[in-house]
Amino acid sequence: MCGIIGYLGYREAYPILINGLKKLEYRGYDSSGIAIFYENGYSLYKSKGKVHELKKKISSYKIKGTTGIGHTRWATHGIPDDINAHPHVSNSNELILIHNGIIENYHAIKIILLKNGFTFKSKTDTEVLVNLIEYIQKKNKLSLEEAVRISLNEIVGAYSIAIVEKSHPERIVIAKLGSPLALGINEREFFIASDPIPFLDYTKNAIYLKDGEMAILRKDQELDLRKIVDNHKLSPIIKELQINLKEIEKGEYKYFMLKEIYEQPKTILDTLRGRLLIKNGLICINGIESNKDIFINAKSITIVACGTSWHASLIGEYLLEELARIPVEVEYASEFRYRNPIIEKKDIVIVISQSGETADTLSALNLAKTKGAFVFGICNVVGSSIARNVDAGAYTHAGPEIGVASTKAFTAQITVLVLLALKIGKYRLAITESRYNYLCQELGSIPEKVNRTLKIDEESIKKISKVYHNVNNFLYLGRGINFPVALEGALKLKEISYIHAEGYPAAEMKHGPIALIDENMPVVIIATKKGCYEKIIGNIQEIKARKGKIIAIVNEGDIQVSMLADYVIKVPNISEELSPLVTVIPLQLLAYQIAFIRGENVDQPRNLAKSVTVE
Ligand code: F6R
């Protein structure tokens, strides 16, 4: 979390930084700040709240300078206020630092610094780091870059940083471990950002710093890239980024989340493109093909992820067990990494992450690798840390997801998991030819069916949202492969509308949650025809007997459930294995509509950030 940005060149830095921070706000929006440097001095501005608060505060100032750094914060140490906002300044007022990540041993370092006469204004770990760099620089009479390097070798934790010395505004030092850092390069100018989007208007030539790398950027000089551990000089490999700017604009939509929901027919098609060759009955996934034997001989698979990606993993468990007949365990990354999991050499671990930067998932990946596992990644962000560190993988190709609540990445992850399960099932002779061919056909029809789902019951969803936008609780029920969809529906509602919601396997309801049901409790129940339909009708009767209100997701042409439910939302008929790809769509729309009616900022829900780079 937190977004960092920087500029060094010949243009005015302020507009680049302030516009760039807006584009990085998805990473955190508790407070923001910028520092702009001029000959022997700098202007520093900070503000609690979103970037527009900062902009408002300084709009009448003339801010001049061609070197600058900026930050948008998701608070870890210290409340969101002006003092804890970045940039942070060292005690002598010489060094100015921005930081994304966490310094885990900051407390021990702070004690040493306090003993050496340093004082602190904020509660942040970042202020400790900038003063550690100053302490080491002054004590040993070092250049800034050498002081940064030695200090970072003392640090336990994760960081991407940019630091400027007041008396040398012609230089910025940057470094990375764990948190992302992209560097845009043009003739006579450098752009620094947590992701390349803020500088795409200026350059597409960029490098992603790797963990353990630092760079010294100097005006009118070549990039100087080094290893933090031993100062070894590295040759930078500059790549041209393939990002379409249209993908990161809202267009006609009020919120990115809505745009991303409506993009799903296209994004699923993009996920399938070149992989599902229906005419030849082929599924092509390089990462599986080049490791065929590992998948054929697998005794089990562990899938590790967080949040929405964890829900996709649960669907993956169902698919891989059903279609490839491999036992699958799904783990929260944060639990997996702290409990000495039983992973042996050559065991398969699949990690799933939209951002490819989630700290817990990244650490789980590293743990699995140290145990000798073969790690396969499913990521959306190309070139992200997780994507770079896995043994093999498949991108989801959903395009940039900007709304904090994940939608199109979820359906893209499920699409990859279906492809994986079918491909591995075929390798292992676990699936019949006819079922394989049938499911390939069905998969090919998904983009059109999702498109139809988006249109079928738009009006009913709006109507239901009007009726229930003020309730305090919601229950979401599903069975089998649609149980994780119920979890996902509840998560979407919670995170953007702040209504308490819980997902449950429908039959489990009578073991506790049924106590909550009364005439005020809306229950969203996924009741598609092929998934334990009769049993679900029984569950609906139990809810009705207690006066609960039923919002049922049913197939087109459904009669029985539709007669019992208070509201129905229809989805097209599709095989049970693929049904999450359509049943989740109305749940995403319902959450969106409810949050919208409540007047919430759908794209930037409180306390959240898109990329969780802290543990
Ligand atoms: C929910 C949401 C989060 C993420 C989670 C994992 O809408 O977006 O729960 O799914 O933080 O993030 P990734 O997939 O980037 O690892």
Image (tube, rainbow, N blue to C red):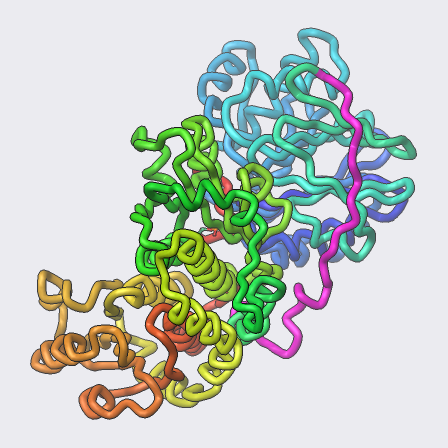
586 over 222 or under it: above or below: below
Specify whether 448 is left or right of 339: right
391 over 11 or under it: above or below: above
Q: Residue at x 81, y 27 (%)?
A: 224
Q: Which residue is drawn at 54% across and 21% down?
A: 155
Specify whether 188 is left or right of 133: right
Residue 88 horizontal/vertical position (percent): 62, 33
Residue 488 horizontal/vertical position (percent): 36, 63
Q: Which residue is drawn at 65% across and 33% down?
A: 210
48 over 364 or under it: above or below: below
Specify whether 462 is left or right of 554: right
Q: Is residue 34 in view from this perspective?
A: no
Q: Is residue 155 in view from this perspective?
A: yes
Residue 338 horizontal/vertical position (percent): 33, 31
Q: Count of labels shown? A: 0
Region of the chain picked out in magenta, as a range: 231-258
Q: What predominant SS class does the magenta segment belong to? A: loop
Q: Nearer the viewer, residue 309 or 391?
A: 391
Residue 247 horizontal/vertical position (percent): 67, 66
